[in-house]
């Protein structure tokens, strides 16, 4: 027989008596028991009393109208103030004058609209703090010209990451080279005159693909993503992917010399040696327009990023503006006494810079089509390129010069200068980077140009750090939001206006053809009724009833047009 101690050890927890469930009629007893239990713990009672006193004090402070954090009053009440200059920067419009009559619904709508506009203005001013990056320019010491500072000195003075962006690629076997940067600024496309094509992630120095097409190359251009690019070869236009695999050979586009890609329209504009300007829709692979310019060889071409109008330079000194909607030029401008060598347009579509055989570089206001500035270059400029911040690069032989504020103030000396190893054949500023790419006879050179790139990018449009999934999502949305080529005009704001003149002219022609106005309605004249039913009040009542029925019928037809079933 086991001892009492051994019996206690062997008893399992299942055999223990469980605590009965609580019932509402047992609450007084539980309270008494709890009181007896707490009565034996004076320290716990003191803690509870102290906690209650603190809570009572905090409630009294909150009743006084003061915000409390951890028992102390908040020294910064309300939202953080917004600087007035920031609010003025994002100001949308003046307040709308409310009507004098008691239109309560209209007044309520105006009040809510003004409140929403004010809130959006304050939010935009606050979020402007999230864009701390600013463009910095190169500044020299006293009596020192910035154009005398060499690229090696700049690379040694900046940090390691920025200094690695200055490099040279010695490719003397297949030069000279044309180049193009992708819209995100991460990928570089090189095309040598003797058939060499290379795709490079130039920031990490990783080679994506490298091929030789065994044919002369006139120009290369990235398409909507960094996975497709176009190469203008000797005979036809070819489309390759980032692995160097040939996707398409478009034989209707022959003898192409220059190309421009319109990203929001998915159009590849090409200029040929036969004088044809052709547009290719890369989303469906169809030719949108083929225009005979009748001006001879087209080897000078650029686009206006603001309205997607193509600018072409001609040997007779004129610059013409083209749209795929018209077979004739939108505008013809006589810019130089000799042939035009290069054309560039800034991102706002306001200024156009041209260089010609007369050794002059001119700045034009595209809005008024008038010259603003004219500069004389001893040897002329063979290539021009504009950065996102308005810096202009001009190539003269083997020397690359960068100018600053060429349209606002007269420029007497360049901002920067650099000599490359061969004759320059292509210039292009890298988006969102202070880098200028130079393609020349001996290969490629990446220059550091402080203040050239836009420091703050739009992550929903061109994100340099996007992942593969983000790129796929962006591509689908861009295809859904593709702008039709019929909407390319000189003034994009005209698309938001109603063409009343055309409607009135069509209506006038229709009236002349029919002999009567089909939209005119005869005035309703109530029939005279006897026995007192044609009183003044009854006549007015019948007029209102007829007008109400006409209104119902017109609204019904308008609604039926809107609810037309999809086919």
Image (tube, rainbow, N blue to C red):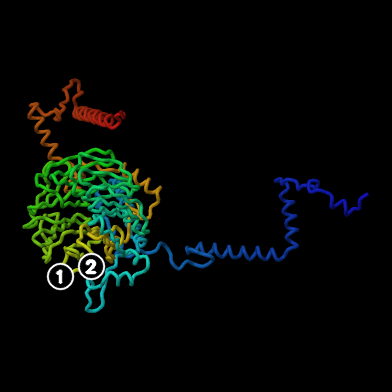
Q: Is residue 109 above or below residue 167?
A: above
480 and 327: which one is in front? 327
The answer to whether residue 88 is visible is no
In the picture, measured across the screen, residue 375 lies left or right of residue 214, that is left
In the picture, measured across the screen, residue 473 lies left or right of residue 19, that is left
Report the label total: 2
**Classed neighbour count for the residue bearing mark 2: other residues with Cα under 10 Å, few (<14), some (14–19), many (≥20):** some
Mark seen at residue 3: none
In the picture, measured across the screen, residue 363 lies left or right of residue 69, that is left
210 and 332: which one is in front? 210
In space, the residues marked 2 and 1 are separated at their CA atoms by 17 Å
The answer to whether residue 225 is visible is yes
| Residue assigned mark 2 | 418
Q: Is residue 411 above or below residue 471?
A: below
Q: Percent position (x, y) of residue 195?
A: 25, 50
| Residue assigned mark 1 | 412
Dot 1 falls on a residue whose secondary structure is loop
Are the two marked residues, 2 and 1, in contact with CB atoms closer than 8 angstroms?
no
Q: Percent position (x, y) of residue 406?
A: 17, 64
Which residue sits furthest left? 337
Image quadrant where one finds the C terminus: top left
């Amino acid at each position: 027989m086991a001892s009492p101690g051994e019996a206690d050890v062997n008893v399992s927890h299942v055999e223990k008596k469980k605590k009965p469930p609580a019932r509402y009629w047992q609450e007084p007893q539980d309270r008494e028991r709890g009181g007896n239990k707490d009565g034996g713990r004076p320290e716990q009672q003191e803690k509870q009393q102290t906690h209650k006193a603190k809570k009572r004090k905090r409630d009294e402070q909150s009743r006084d109208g003061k915000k409390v954090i951890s028992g102390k009053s908040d020294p910064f009440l309300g939202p953080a103030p917004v600087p007035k200059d920031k609010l003025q920067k994002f100001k949308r419009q003046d307040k709308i004058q409310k009507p004098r009559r008691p239109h309560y619904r209209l007044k309520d709508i105006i009040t809510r609209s003004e409140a929403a506009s004010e809130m959006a203005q304050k939010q935009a001013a606050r979020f402007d703090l999230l864009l701390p990056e600013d463009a910095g320019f190169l500044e020299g010491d006293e009596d020192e010209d910035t154009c005398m500072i060499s690229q090696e000195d700049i690379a040694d003075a900046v940090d390691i990451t920025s200094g690695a962006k200055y490099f040279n690629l010695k490719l003397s076997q297949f030069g000279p080279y044309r180049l193009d940067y992708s819209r995100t600024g991460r990928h570089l496309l090189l095309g040598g005159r003797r058939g060499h094509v290379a795709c490079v992630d130039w920031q990490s120095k990783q080679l994506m693909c490298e091929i030789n097409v065994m044919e002369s190359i006139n120009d290369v251009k990235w398409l909507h993503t960094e996975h497709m690019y176009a190469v203008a070869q000797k005979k036809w236009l070819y489309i390759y992917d980032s692995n160097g695999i040939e996707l398409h050979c478009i034989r209707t586009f022959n003898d192409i010399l220059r190309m421009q890609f319109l990203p929001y329209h998915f159009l590849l504009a090409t200029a040929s040696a036969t004088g044809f300007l052709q547009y290719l829709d890369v989303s469906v692979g169809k030719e949108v327009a083929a225009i005979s310019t009748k001006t001879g060889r087209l080897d000078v071409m650029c686009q206006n990023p603001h309205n997607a109008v193509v600018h072409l330079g001609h040997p007779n000194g004129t610059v013409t503006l083209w749209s795929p909607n018209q077979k004739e030029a939108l505008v013809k401008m006589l810019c130089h006494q000799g042939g035009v060598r290069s054309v560039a347009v800034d991102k706002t579509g306001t200024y156009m810079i041209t260089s010609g055989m007369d050794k002059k570089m001119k700045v034009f206001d595209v809005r008024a089509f008038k010259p603003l500035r004219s500069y004389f270059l001893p040897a002329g400029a063979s290539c021009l390129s504009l950065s996102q911040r308005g810096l202009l690069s001009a190539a003269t032989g083997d020397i690359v010069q960068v100018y600053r504020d060429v349209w606002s103030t007269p420029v007497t000396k360049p901002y920067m200068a650099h000599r490359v190893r061969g004759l320059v054949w292509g210039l292009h500023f890298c988006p969102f980077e202070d880098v200028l790419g130079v393609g020349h006879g001996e290969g490629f050179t990446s220059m550091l140009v402080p203040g050239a790139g836009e420091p703050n990018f739009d992550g929903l449009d061109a994100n340099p750090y996007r992942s593969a999934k983000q790129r796929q999502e962006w591509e689908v949305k861009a295809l859904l939001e593709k702008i039709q080529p019929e909407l390319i005009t000189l003034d994009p704001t005209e698309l938001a206006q109603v063409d009343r003149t055309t409607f009135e002219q069509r209506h006038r022609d229709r009236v002349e053809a029919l002999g009567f106005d089909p939209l005119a309605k005869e005035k309703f004249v109530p029939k005279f009724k006897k026995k007192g039913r044609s009183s003044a009040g009854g006549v007015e009542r019948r007029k209102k009833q007829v007008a109400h029925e006409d209104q119902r019928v017109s609204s019904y037809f308008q609604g039926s047009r809107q609810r037309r079933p999809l086919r």
